[in-house]
Image (cartoon, grey):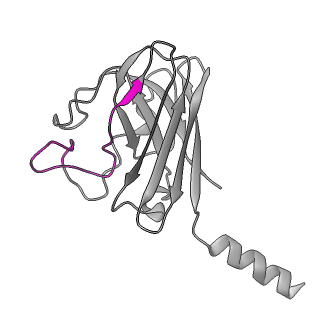
């Protein structure tokens, strides 16, 4: 009994190695999934969507794990633990929530995978969690604070696995 309690305690103290989010639009329709996996050198994010409007869409991790429709303002600002400016092309940026745009094809499907260097699972999965948001327009990679990426269309809260 004591050994089982110690094993459970050790498992609960182990940092999460992955986090997943079910992505939904403002009506609650499931649009896709996102997964972050801890690798030896970074966090690896992969996103898959279907049923979206074709084109480039800004993709960001936001600081709060809360997706209240219709505007998803509850997800707060971009995840930015270092207090940097937005935009991977910003001469004084970028922060951990900055990512490449998501390309969605004419069939409404899109996917992307890339590494978030310098980010940690502990930082991502803090007390108030984190959310992944997909925006209406493409991120221009330089305008602070949001890359001029427009409305928040799709949101998903990361949970540990």
Residue 21 colored in magenta in the image? no
Up/down of 136 relative to 97, above or below:
above
Residue 79 picture location, percent across and down: 35, 48
Q: Is residue 37 visible?
A: yes
Q: Is residue 67 visible?
A: no
The quarter of the picture where the N terminus appears is bottom right
Residue 81 picture location, percent across and down: 31, 57
Residue depicted at x 50% and y 37%: 47
- In the displayed structure image, the side of residue 122 where residue 4 appears, left or right: right
- In the displayed structure image, the side of residue 147 where residue 134 appears, left or right: right
Residue depicted at x 28% and y 26%: 149
Residue depicted at x 38% and y 34%: 59
**SS majority, magenta:** loop
Give the total number of marks visible in the rendering: 0
Residue 98 colored in magenta in the image? yes
Residue 38 picture location, percent across and down: 51, 61
Up/down of 95 relative to 40, above or below:
above
Give residue 32's quadrant in the image.
top right
The quarter of the picture where the C terminus appears is bottom right
Q: Residue furthest left?
A: 91
Bounds of the magenta span? 85-103
Residue depicted at x 50% and y 31%: 155
- In the displayed structure image, the side of residue 145 where residue 150 appears, left or right: right
């Amino acid at each position: 009994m004591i050994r089982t309690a110690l094993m459970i305690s050790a498992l609960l103290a182990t940092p999460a190695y992955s986090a997943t989010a079910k992505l939904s639009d403002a009506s609650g329709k499931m649009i896709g999934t996102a997964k972050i996996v801890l690798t030896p050198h970074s966090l690896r994010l992969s996103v898959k969507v279907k049923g979206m409007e074709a084109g480039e869409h800004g993709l960001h991790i936001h600081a709060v794990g809360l997706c209240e429709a219709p505007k998803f303002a509850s997800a707060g600002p971009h995840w930015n633990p270092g207090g940097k400016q937005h935009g991977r092309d910003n001469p004084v940026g970028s922060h951990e929530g900055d990512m490449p745009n998501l390309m969605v094809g004419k069939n409404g499907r899109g996917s992307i995978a890339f590494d978030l260097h310098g980010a940690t699972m502990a930082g991502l999965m803090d007390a108030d969690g984190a959310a992944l948001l997909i925006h209406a327009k493409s991120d221009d990679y330089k305008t602070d604070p949001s890359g001029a990426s427009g409305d928040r269309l799709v949101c998903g809260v990361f949970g540990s696995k």
